[in-house]
Each structure stands twice: as structure tokens, then as C-alpha cells.
Image: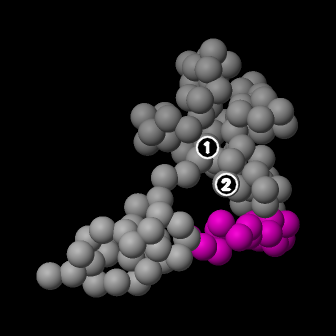
Amino acid sequence: APSARLVSRDLAGVAKFMASDACKRVVVLTGAGVSCAAGIPDFRSPGGMYDTLRPELITATPQERALMAADPVNVVVKDMFMKNQFPYHEVRRPFILGTQAKKWKATLFHRFL
């Protein structure tokens, strides 16, 4: 049976293992910072979605607006999305339009994935 061990922990060793039959899966954990280098603002940075969220302008109930005003994270919470998709899509509109206009450039890491 092939060894499931890395020959070395450098890029060449990892690449060799990933190309081998011993490698069954690859899992990559990243954060929003991966896309910041492409010009895509993350949620928490100045100018990001949480910083610029204006609940009073969102298509939402007064209760949903109050939740978003108290904590902007609520705009991406699954429970709210399942009841009302407008808040999420409205705040994601600049990203969606930027994607359509090819405003963002994939980074080396995006291409690696």
C-alpha cells in the first residue's frame, strides 16, 4: 500500500502527495482575506458590507431592520435569508454587478483552488 506520509512539508512534497494515489481528498480552509487581494472587500473591513450596511434602506420588516441595526451579521444569517432573501441580495448587489463587469481579478490563490 502506498505511504500516506509526506516526503517533505515543502511545496514540492505536498504537491507530490496530492498527485499520488494516497491522497484521497484535499480540504482548504480560508477566510474572506483571500479575496481582498482581488479587490473584493470583506464584510468587516472599512468600506465592507458591515460598515456600509444601512438597514433603513433594505427591503425588510421593521423587526428584520432592527436585527440588522443591532448586528450587521444578521443580514447573512440563514434564518433571515430563509424568510426574506431581499436583504442578502440587496447588500450583495455591488459584488454581483462587479463580477458581471469583471471588476475583480482572480488571485494566484483563487487559481490554485
Q: Judge the density around disc 1: few (<14), some (14-19), many (≥20) Cα neighbours within 10 Å.
A: some
Answer above or below: position of 22 versus 9: below
Question: The residue under label 2 is which amino acid type?
Answer: Val
Q: Secondary structure at mark 2?
A: helix
Numbered badge on residue 7 = none
> Depth check: 57 or 112 in front?
112
Q: Which residue is mark 2?
A: 34
Q: Is residue 36 magenta?
A: no
In this picture, is 83 found above or below 33? Answer: above
Q: Is residue 37 left or right of residue 63?
A: right
Q: Residue at x 73, y 67 (%)?
A: 107
To which residue does mark 1 refer?
A: 88
Instruction: Give the residues drawn in magenta, as a range.
Output: 99-113
Which quarter of the figure is the N terminus placed in? bottom left
Q: Secondary structure at mark 1?
A: helix
What is the quadrant of residue 109 in the picture? bottom right
